[in-house]
Amino acid sequence: MNRKIVITCTVLALLLLGGIGFGFYKLFSHSDTSEEEISVSRGDAISAVPSDAVMIYDFAEQEESHIDAFLDKGTPLMKFLKVFLQETEHQGFVISVHYPAKNTIAPLFVISVEDPKEREELKKLLENSCSGVINKRYSGVIISKTVIPGVSYAFHHQFLIASPSHVLVESSIRHLENKTSIQDNPLYARGAKGVSGDMILHVNNQNIGKFFSGAVNRDYLGVASFFSSFASWGSFRVERGENDGQIKGTGLLYNTKDVANFSSIFTKTKKGTSGIFDILPHNTEYVMTFPLDDVDGYLDSYMTYLEAAKKANDYTYLNAIAPRNAGADISPKEWFLSLDVKEIALASVPEGKGGEKLVLMRLKDPSVMKLYGGYIPTLLGKFFTPTSDEAYSVVDDWVIVGSRKMVDKFAQQTQNELYFSMKRYLEQTSAADICRESASVLGVVNLAKCSDSLALYFKEMFSKPVIKGLGEYNFNYLTFSLNGHGEDVHTSFVWYAQNMALLPQPPVAQTAAAEKAVYDETVVEVPKGPFEVKNFTNGKKNYLQQMDDLKIRLLDDKKRGVWTIPFDGKLCGYVVQVDHFKNNKLQMVFCSGDKMYMLDRLGRWVKPFPVTLKKGVLLGPAVYDFDKNLHYTIMVLHTDNTIGMYDIQGKAVESWTPVTLNEKIKHMPQMLELGGGRYWIIRTGYQTVICNENGVPVTDFSKKKRLVSDTKVEKRSEREVVVTNVEGKDMVLNLQTGTMKKL
């Protein structure tokens, strides 16, 4: 599953809960039911629910407002039931959600009518009230279909069964005849026994993938498998909260031992109190945080899940090669443990279209922080993948990982006295309790900010009514928590609805002086090919490609395979050609690990290659023939952030001073030839440094002489170039003397 899908899974999970909450809020906002407990008398309507139910809403009593909460008044089923509800009142009914056909989601309504005389009266009532009824027989049972509004229904045994889907009604009858139902699912039995209340929501995670297959847009179909494996089953009691506009759900997520469920990770993790709300801005779109009192325990639980999911081998392999890819001498696990992480979170904050995903870590001592690209998702899973991990900033005891632009902005904001944090915001709302809750996992989603996401992820027929409802009923927040409960996971979620006009507002923005963020950059873009090479026998283009299994193959000019050879390392970016034997026959040179390799056109290794460069290569090689005599010079960017220069035999060039900078060098140097001299332009995400042909900076690039990372370097004379300094001023730099003056 790629990064987009992983992040999308999170958003959709939160929005699904929000949609369920929407229905329950409608219920409570219309209900005049007493706050006192009602005696629960559900009857056995559940016995008519087919085994493939995705969700089941089980109500202890029947009221029109209850059904209206989950079936819009404009739907065919609601129009049909309105006739029934106006004339009768019963206890115990069920609304279940099914997937009767491809890309189709439909509800099923079941209510027990035990009195035979009453059933006959209801039949007549419904026939007389509907504009035309077509009767068909199925397994000896008459199924009636109304012409208007287009609902199929049947009386079978003591039940009234109704649905817009004729197939669903037939399925219910078939299950009744076979004396089977969702009740036969042992997970339902666990949920029905473990959770009690007047309104119970059951979620069949094993079938919920079908729901998302029918509800989400095509690009996000990959989320189905994630939800199917998150848990096996969930059962929740839903009730009005302590405050107005507050709907609360509490219950359990059930996991089967023979199925790899992601939520099983949290059955053994310890509770912790979060500090995330102090640091995030008030307009955060969503956050999910993991207070880690026991880092080793969490990692062990995660590995147990991977082993059950048969993903442990891939995980181990990725962690093994991560140090080489990141240019590190420490494994992801060793690195993470050395940081002494107390909490880790993923949050989305407003930035452009769709926001930016940040990873935040609370450390015992942030001064020990050293960031390696890709380490966080490699160790903790793809869920913890920020939009970018090129930089980090330190604010108090928190490290914020993201794009340089965002972490710099983050640090600036948090140092402002007027900073309006998420905690300051929530403490002025009815959702304040989440700031003090202790849990293994805590989450908050700003439902008011999710309209764009809903439209992006869900099909219009699903997103449009929910977006409308979010505005109509003033939904603003959904909070949730997860905690281990034996072999299961205790879950709590709360929906909050308040008049948006009454919500706290941030203070008027003011400019405040703040120091620049402490940051480091990690991302080095390594080209993946295929790499264009020349077939010296016919002058046509060929391509050298590294496959997913690390094998190397040559493609002809029409991208057809010529040969394939085994290889055990990842190429470091470039494939260049040289005439090593000076006979007009070209060989291919590339790097992997700490070695430089050479292949001929037929896929044979050229001796004495590979040659060892003593240090790992992150990017390269770049090959130069300075004197045009086929005496090649090789330049590479090493994993220790130094630029090395070698001859074709892999020996270090004695005149070269290895270039190193405090920030990550992100690209191979750009060569500049001027005035008979040769210079190297080296860029990081923070600055640009220009060195002479031996790797020595032409001047001290500090203070006002520091050049911006994207500065132009334009020729002014045979000695001078025009550059831009950190103050945004165009300057004239003399490459020979190192002097710099205003243009």
Image (cartoon, grey):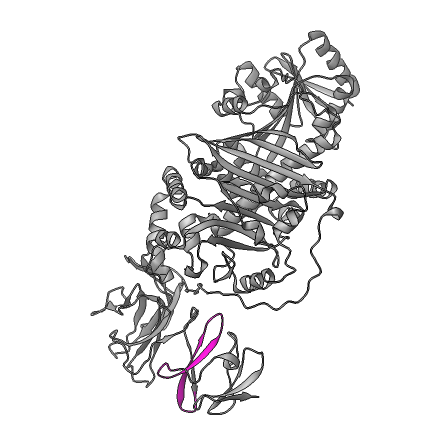
Vertical comparison of 352 with 438: above or below: below
Q: With 232 as the anchor, is 616 left or right in this view?
A: left
Question: Which corner quadrant of the image does residue 547 belong to?
Answer: bottom left
Q: Count how many numbered circles sit on residues in the image.
A: 0
Q: With 464 as the anchor, is 388 left or right in this view?
A: left
Vertical comparison of 727 with 50: above or below: below
Query: In this rendering, does residue 528 appear at all?
Result: yes
Query: In this rendering, does residue 147 appear at all?
Result: no
Q: Over which residues does the magenta segment extend? A: 674-696
Residue drawn at 38 percent across, 61 percent down = 326
Q: Position of residue 130 (x, y in %)?
A: 77, 22
- The extreme left residue here reads 608
Q: Position of residue 637 (x, y in %)?
A: 36, 70
- Which is more toward the observer, 304 or 5? 304
Residue drawn at 49 percent across, 45 percent down = 290
Residue drawn at 75 percent across, 11 percent down = 121
- In the rendered image, which quarter contains the C terminus? bottom right
Q: Position of residue 92 (x, y in %)?
A: 65, 19
Q: Is residue 64 magenta?
A: no
Q: Is residue 683 magenta?
A: yes
Question: Which corner quadrant of the image does residue 157 belong to?
Answer: top right
- The extreme top residue here reads 117
- Which is more toward the observer, 222 or 281? 281
- Which is more toward the observer, 370 or 76? 370
Vertical comparison of 17 with 634: above or below: above
Q: With 323 as the anchor, is 674 left or right in this view?
A: right
Q: Position of residue 572 (x, y in %)?
A: 36, 65
